[in-house]
Image: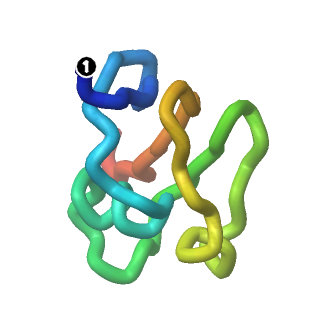
Amino acid sequence: MPEPTIRLNGAETPLRAATLAALIAEHAPSADGRGVAAAVNGAVVRRAEWANVTLAPGDAVEIVLARQGG
């Protein structure tokens, strides 16, 4: 049976995290979430809600990291 996947920033990715918070912890370098924005299936999710968002196979997740520089 194939492993369930999500689309993370446009790329097919195995679904190993149960929540958006867990996924962000795996893929974002900032432990407290500062400078990170996230959307699931086109809807922006506030940081306070990340732990409450359960991911499902086929979800489209975008994680955007703010970068400083020029």
Q: Position of residue 70 (x, y in %)?
A: 34, 39
Q: Position of residue 55 (x, y in %)?
A: 53, 50
Q: Residues within 10 Å of mark 1 (few under 14, many from 20)?
A: few
| Near-viewer residue (65 or 15) | 15
User: For this view, does 16 lie left or right of residue 55?
Assistant: left
**Rendered position, 4 above or below 15:** above
Q: Position of residue 36 (x, y in %)?
A: 47, 59
**Who's the residue at 36% across and 49% down the image?**
67
**Who's the residue at 34% across and 18% down the image?**
12
**Who's the residue at 53% across and 26% down the image?**
58
Look at the numbered disc 1 and give the secondary structure of its residue. Answer: loop
Q: How is the image coloured?
A: rainbow
Query: How many marks can you see?
Result: 1
Task: Locate the N terminus and report the quarter of the image it occupies.
Answer: top left
The residue at the far right in this view is 43
| Near-viewer residue (31 or 67) | 31
Residue that badge 1 annotates: 2
User: For this view, does 36 lie left or right of residue 43?
Assistant: left
Residue type of the residue flagged with mark 1: Pro
Q: Position of residue 24 (x, y in %)?
A: 37, 59
